[in-house]
Image (cartoon, rainbow, N blue to C red):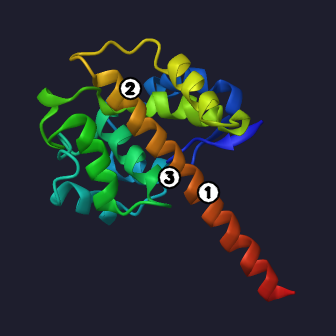
Amino acid sequence: MQWTIPGTTLTGEREDAQRVDAVFQALFLAGGLTLSQVASISGLEPHTVQNWVKRGYLAPPRGKRYNMDQVCRILNINLLKGALTLEQSCQLISYLNGSLTDESDDLIDDTLLYFFFVRLAARARYFGGTETWDSALEEVTLSYHEPVPGAREKLGQVLKIMLTAWLTGRMKAETEQMLSQLKTI
């Protein structure tokens, strides 16, 4: 089933979510991405990304190129924007990774967090109650190795919030589209 990969303008098969890391690695074969490439992939305006750098939500690019971790941070924030403010999104990421500009205190890098989220979101249509969420979370994060005790629990909390926010944003957009169709009738 076709879907738009969360936080991006890229489409693919939902069933291919397990291979999202391979898709992204192919994007970075030539090195980092330029601002225009990041804008194209994320659907964000270039000045928005630059503003996030200026505000300290994202490390500045090196040699005018964004690495995969920076792009995944952008996508993590972008997929939350339908339900959370920019500050709330960054607060959520900080809960897991401490300072947004210091990677030494991270419990998980932004790339792995994004890949886990995409795999979890791909399963979202099958979710019933929270027990289904917990089972999916366990499967998706199976390869995660806790750098400190309690990190896996924090990761699970953050992924649940991300999923809830992403689903809420999608439902809000769908609701707005339905409302706009009422006006044309």
What is the three-letter code of the residue carrying label 3? Answer: Ala
Name the image quarter holding residue 95.
top left
Q: Which residue is mark 1?
A: 170
Residue 120 placed where, x, y %? 56, 31
* Residue 12 sits above or below residue 23 on the image: below
First along the sequence among labels 1 and 2: 2
Name the image quarter holding residue 14.
top right
Q: Which residue is mark 2?
A: 112
Q: Is residue 16 left or right of residue 155?
A: right
Q: Which residue shows up at 61% across the image and 57% down it? A: 170
Is there CB contact under 8 Å for labels 2 and 3? no
Q: Of helix, strand and loop, which one carries label 2?
A: helix
Classify mark 1: residues with Cα within 10 Å, few (<14), some (14-19) or many (20+): some
Q: CA distance from mark 1 to mark 3?
A: 9 Å
Name the image quarter holding residue 27.
top left
Q: Which residue is mark 3?
A: 165
Residue 159 placed where, x, y %? 44, 36
Asked if residue 100 can be seen in this view, the reply is yes
Classify mark 2: residues with Cα within 10 Å, few (<14), some (14-19) or many (20+): some
Q: CA distance from mark 2 to mark 3?
A: 19 Å
Q: Of helix, strand and loop, which one carries label 1?
A: helix
Q: Of helix, strand and loop, which one carries label 3?
A: helix
